[in-house]
Amino acid sequence: MTQESQAVNSSVTLSMREGVEIIEIQNQYACASVSTFGATVLSYTPVGQADLLWVSKDAVYDQSKPIRGGIPVCWPWFGRSQIEGYPAHGVVRNKVWRLERTETAEDGTTSVTLVTFADDATKVYWPHEFKLSLTVEVGAELNVTLTTQNLSDVSVDITEALHTYFQIADPRGLVIDGLEGSVHVDKLVENADPETQKEPLVLQPAKDSVYFDQHDDINIEDRGHGRVINICKQHSQSTVVWNPGPEIVKGFSDMDDDAWLEFVCVESGNVFDNAVKIHPHSEHSLIVTYSIKNS
Ligand code: TA6
């Protein structure tokens, strides 16, 4: 279905994909796309490379649920809420954000900033005033900054993550290094004891582990695509590694049974015990830079 597109500037156009508005970015470095629904980066394809990100071919674009893939924004909590009926991964990945500004840097990098604020819907679950901004910088690297502004008169504690789905040639035996030395908990094992990661992780799906007090750069050795994906993060204490594997994937209506063979989630944020306290009228930014090196 062809959709009319509207040019914002020479690098940015707006179009619709079914019920979702898409911000399309194209410059000398890469092309990328971001949905205003959930402020979800859906693709980042540097010139000469495969897309960094994975989106399910069964993803839903009618705003009835978060888009499966790309970089969903988990905020102001990560994971399942302790409160029955509250949405998993918070309240902003399934609402429409506003495109606040676009900028072109001197080196030709294109940035777009999307914002969202507290409203009646968010206050049902989280009774605080806030401004949340996501700035996506598309250049030789992909830089994503999630900034929380606490507009209330009380301190708030948040957990958060950029829940990034990386397109991978084969997750079986995938080597992920940079987690060494951090303490991880396996969420697939009830009451699992924390363990210290001693070696680079060799992924054997299914995997759902949280790495605490983890600060180092992470390298994902995507050998099948002849590349290494580097994750460099600032103000992030946690990393989550997730791949549902062949059985758990069957429980997701927006992924087919083989989808687990196409991606790995390596999520940068501040989750569970690594919560962030933001004082009244203060702010906090989670910053992640993704880059690709040929291997
Ligand atoms: O980050 C891993 C995880 O928390 C998994 O436990 C799984 O639930 C995944 O996120 C996807 O969650 P979603 O709510 O997007 O289906």
Image (spheres, rainbow, N blue to C red):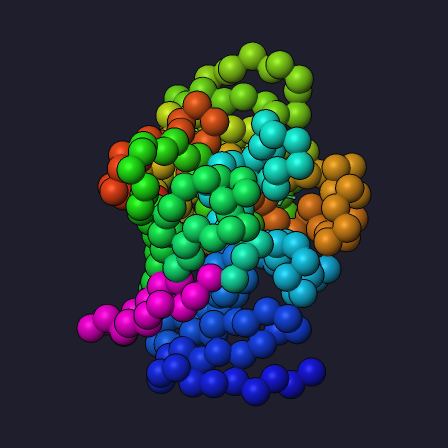
Task: In the rendered view, tell whether residue 167 sits above or below residue 240.
Answer: below
> Which residue sits at x=58%, y=76%?
16
> Which residue sits at x=46%, y=31%?
271
Check if residue 100 falls in the magenta segment: yes
- The answer to whether any part of residue 53 appears in the image is no
Question: On the image, which quarter does residue 284 sit in?
Answer: top left
Image position of 258 (left or right of 266): right
Where residue 86 appears, as percent x and y from the top left, is 61, 38
Q: In the displayed orientation, state which residue is furthest to the left.
A: 106
Image position of 163 (left or right of 67): left
> Which residue occupies the foreground of this view, 287 or 134?
134
Image position of 103 (left or right of 83): left
Residue range (magenta): 97-114
Check if residue 112 falls in the magenta segment: yes
Image position of 194 (left or right of 86): left
> Which residue sits at x=48%, y=78%?
14
Where residue 172 appears, as percent x and y from the top left, is 65, 40
Where residue 215 appears, as percent x and y from the top left, is 34, 32
Quarter of image, ligand 1: top right
> Which residue sits at x=41%, y=41%?
128
